[in-house]
């Protein structure tokens, strides 16, 4: 059976160029804004005097608040304690706006799922960008343009930053040259992060074609790398998925010449082993190089996993 | 016009043709679709699927959706319901003939003395019964006959078979005497024997007959006694000596007496692998370690002995072909050792069987001519359900098929609605 015969009717055409594009409607944008407001407020409540989980470590003194049991005594204002005989801690905030770089994978494999992994990645990126803007960060979004190897996007900040983020992300479609590996290739992303003096780099995709060594170069110095891995439900369990009562055959959207196959039980066992080994490699690399890693299903709302992503 | 399906007659076969054709078309279409394989869908992680595998290389599985299978089942059942299923006219019940089998030694003698390996009297009589049951007896008794072979020895179970069962073709050991067929002159009964005797009033008779069969009639250490048809002569090699098997662990005193008897009678010790022996001396059940002192008595003697359980009062029991000891050992000399020895040796003499091939003279005499007579017919209802009962059953089958078809159709619709 040749490739053409094997795929007479590929019913899910979302992998094709121009199809399966990201749609960020008003409801999603409202959710992102609401999410950012809630999370930044929660982060402010967790402000422990001097270091904010999202605001970074640049410290500008803004006032005092009562000491809470269990807090780090290094932030206690001992002079005030001597004068008032009551414990207070110093409260700081970022004195200089931190820079973030957010990049998403738009390779053909991201078209899989309903909603697609690309849609899920874009919504998660929008949530992360909204949060970054909310806490005063300068955010740069990077998406593969595909035309001549250029990257699309740019720095977002100030008023209208979220609207510009939506414009940057909306309409992104999966394409053969849209993978994260192209963003990482040749140090393009590293150069951007260095230029922007980014303290956080957020990468969202399925990481199937990413060279882990290239990934590790991004997180040098004080820069923290956050990895978000999106998995479609059928990728987690491709056994016996039916469409119209018929069992699906699977093909690799990034290898269209390879024939579609209906896997046997033995095939599925080897598939699980391969997928688990890949996930373990990625998780081990993240642990060893202090990168955060969040994994989610493309069917889950971004509010569930973006907090984990930005830990 | 009618047709048959399994054990059903179809009263209106053409009425079921339409759903049957629809089921066939649906099945063919489903198979064609299944051969083409399911829809091809992208899987970002498809690279982790192996390139080839055992069943992958054979092409896609023929995987029919459950909704299609249920729909096909519904169409088939509706075809059955519309075709008017009716139970077939039942065949008349077979009448059972009890064949009472004589297994005395004469039954296992050959019909032709010149051909010792040829057909034997029991086989000739059984063959006559089988042939008669298939032909004239079946016609005379108004229907098919089923044969139930019942040996008349020691309550062996009867078995139904179209021919003489193999276990009855082997002569019993020990030999059983010729039965007298007392109290079994009844309808639907056949006496299977060799000697033509007075015709029973109601039972049938199948006598194999056969001329006299000369041969060994007794055995002694000096040779077998052979009947030549008129006189009895002694021949040294006409039959082998009887074989004796003695249980391990026998009390020394008892073992010595048994050995003395064996030597005197010319009996040989059996080898370990001898399956058939003419006498077996068995000890008591060795289970349990306790020994009880008991007093055992015989003809003109008594003795103290050790037994595996209390209350034992007999030192042995005699059975054809074996002597079963009830004591582990003598606890002292018997009060009359001579009487004890005579009693034990007599028990061994009574128990030992004749060696193979040795048949009493009375059994070797001529059985006369073969005879065959049909039994009388006993009372019995051969019919099963009547016409009214068949009609009722037909309606039930039709309703059941229609109900099942409706349920399957609902199942198909439900499966379809959930994408199965």
Image (cartoon, rainbow, N blue to C red):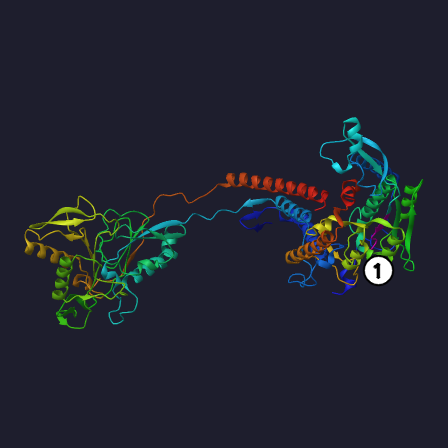
Q: Residues within 10 Å of mark 1 (few under 14, many from 20)?
A: some
Residue drawn at the location 12% of the way across and 56% of the way down: B344
Under circle 1, the secondary element is helix
User: In screen coordinates, is B396 left or right of A43?
Assistant: left
Task: Name the magenta segment's main secondary structure.
Answer: strand
**Rendered location of residue A119, percent (x, y):** 82, 47
Can you name the residue that lies furthest to the right here? A159
B373 drawn magenta: no
For label 1, the residue is A185
Callout count: 1
Instruction: Please tell me whether residue A90 is drawn above or below residue B91 in the rendered image.
Output: above
**Rendered location of residue B175, percent (x, y):** 22, 58
Residue drawn at the location 69% of the way across and 41% of the way down: B414
Res. B241 image quadrant: bottom left
Res. A145 image quadrant: bottom right
Q: Nearer the viewer, residue B240 or B110?
A: B240
* Magenta residue span: A100-107
**Rendered location of residue B385, percent (x, y):** 48, 41
Q: Label 1 is found on which chain of the structure?
A: A
Residue A9 in sight from this viewpoint:
no
**Rendered location of residue B135, percent (x, y):** 38, 57
């Amino acid at each position: 059976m040749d490739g053409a015969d094997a795929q007479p009717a590929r019913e899910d055409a979302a992998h094709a160029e121009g199809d399966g594009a990201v749609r960020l409607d008003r409801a999603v944008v409202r959710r992102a804004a609401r999410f950012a407001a809630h999370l930044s407020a929660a982060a402010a409540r967790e402000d422990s005097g001097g270091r904010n989980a999202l605001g970074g470590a640049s410290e500008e003194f803004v006032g005092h608040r009562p000491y809470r049991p269990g807090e780090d005594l290094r932030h206690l204002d001992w002079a005030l304690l001597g004068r008032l005989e009551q414990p207070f801690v110093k409260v700081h905030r970022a004195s200089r706006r931190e820079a973030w770089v957010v990049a998403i994978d738009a390779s053909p494999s991201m078209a899989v799922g309903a909603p697609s992994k690309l849609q899920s990645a874009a919504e998660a990126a929008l949530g992360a960008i909204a949060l970054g803007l909310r806490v005063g960060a300068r955010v740069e979004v990077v998406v593969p343009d595909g035309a001549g190897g250029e990257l699309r996007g740019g720095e977002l900040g100030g008023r209208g930053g979220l609207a510009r983020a939506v414009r940057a992300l909306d309409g992104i479609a999966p394409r053969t040259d849209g993978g994260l590996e192209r963003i990482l290739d040749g140090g393009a992303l590293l150069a951007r992060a260095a230029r922007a003096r980014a303290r956080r780099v957020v990468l969202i995709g399925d990481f199937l074609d990413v060279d882990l060594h290239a990934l590790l170069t991004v997180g040098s110095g004080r820069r923290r790398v956050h990895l978000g891995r999106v998995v479609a439900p059928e990728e987690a369990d491709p056994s016996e998925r039916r469409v119209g009562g018929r069992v699906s055959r699977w093909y690799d959207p990034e290898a269209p010449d390879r024939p579609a196959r209906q896997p046997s039980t033995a095939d599925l066992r080897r598939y699980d082993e391969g997928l688990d080994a890949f996930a373990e490699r990625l998780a081990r690399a993240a642990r060893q190089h202090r990168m955060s890693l969040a994994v989610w299903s493309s069917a889950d709302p971004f509010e569930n996993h973006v907090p984990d992503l930005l830990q | 016009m009618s047709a048959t399906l399994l054990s059903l007659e179809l009263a209106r076969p053409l009425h079921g043709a339409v759903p049957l054709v629809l089921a066939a078309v649906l099945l063919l279409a489903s198979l064609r679709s299944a051969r083409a394989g399911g829809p091809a869908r992208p899987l970002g992680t498809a690279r982790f699927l192996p390139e080839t595998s055992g069943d992958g290389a054979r092409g896609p599985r023929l995987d029919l959706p459950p909704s299609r299978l249920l729909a096909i089942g519904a169409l088939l059942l509706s075809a059955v319901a519309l075709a008017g299923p009716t139970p077939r006219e039942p065949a008349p019940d077979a009448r059972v003939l009890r064949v009472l089998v004589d297994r005395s030694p004469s039954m296992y003698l050959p019909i032709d003395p010149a051909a010792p390996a040829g057909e034997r009297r029991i086989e000739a009589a059984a063959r006559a019964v089988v042939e008669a049951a298939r032909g004239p007896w079946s016609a005379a008794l108004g229907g098919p006959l089923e044969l139930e072979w019942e040996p008349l020895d020691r309550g062996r179970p009867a078995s139904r078979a179209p021919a003489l069962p193999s276990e009855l073709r082997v002569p019993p050991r020990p030999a059983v005497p010729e039965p007298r067929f007392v109290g079994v002159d009844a309808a639907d009964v056949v006496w299977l024997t060799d000697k033509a005797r007075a015709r029973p009033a109601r039972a049938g008779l199948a006598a194999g007959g056969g001329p006299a069969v000369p041969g060994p009639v007794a055995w002694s250490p000096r040779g077998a006694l052979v009947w030549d048809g008129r006189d009895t002569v002694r021949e040294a090699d006409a039959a082998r000596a009887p074989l004796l098997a003695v249980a391990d662990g026998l009390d020394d005193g008892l073992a010595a007496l048994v050995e003395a008897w064996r030597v005197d009678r010319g009996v040989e010790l059996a080898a370990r692998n001898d399956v058939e022996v003419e006498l077996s001396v068995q000890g008591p059940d060795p289970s349990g370690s306790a020994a009880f002192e008991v007093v055992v008595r015989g003809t003109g003697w008594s003795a103290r002995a050790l037994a595996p359980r209390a209350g034992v009062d007999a030192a042995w029991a005699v059975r054809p072909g074996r002597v079963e000891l009830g004591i582990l050992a003598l606890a002292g000399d018997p009060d009359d050792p001579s009487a004890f020895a005579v009693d034990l040796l007599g028990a061994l003499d009574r128990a030992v069987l004749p060696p193979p091939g040795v048949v009493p003279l009375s059994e070797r005499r001529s059985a006369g001519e073969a005879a065959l007579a049909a039994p009388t017919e006993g009372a019995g209802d051969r019919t099963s359900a009547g016409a009214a009962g068949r009609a009722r059953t037909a309606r039930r089958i039709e309703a059941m098929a229609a109900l099942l078809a409706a349920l399957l159709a609902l199942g198909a619709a439900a499966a379809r609605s959930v994408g199965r």
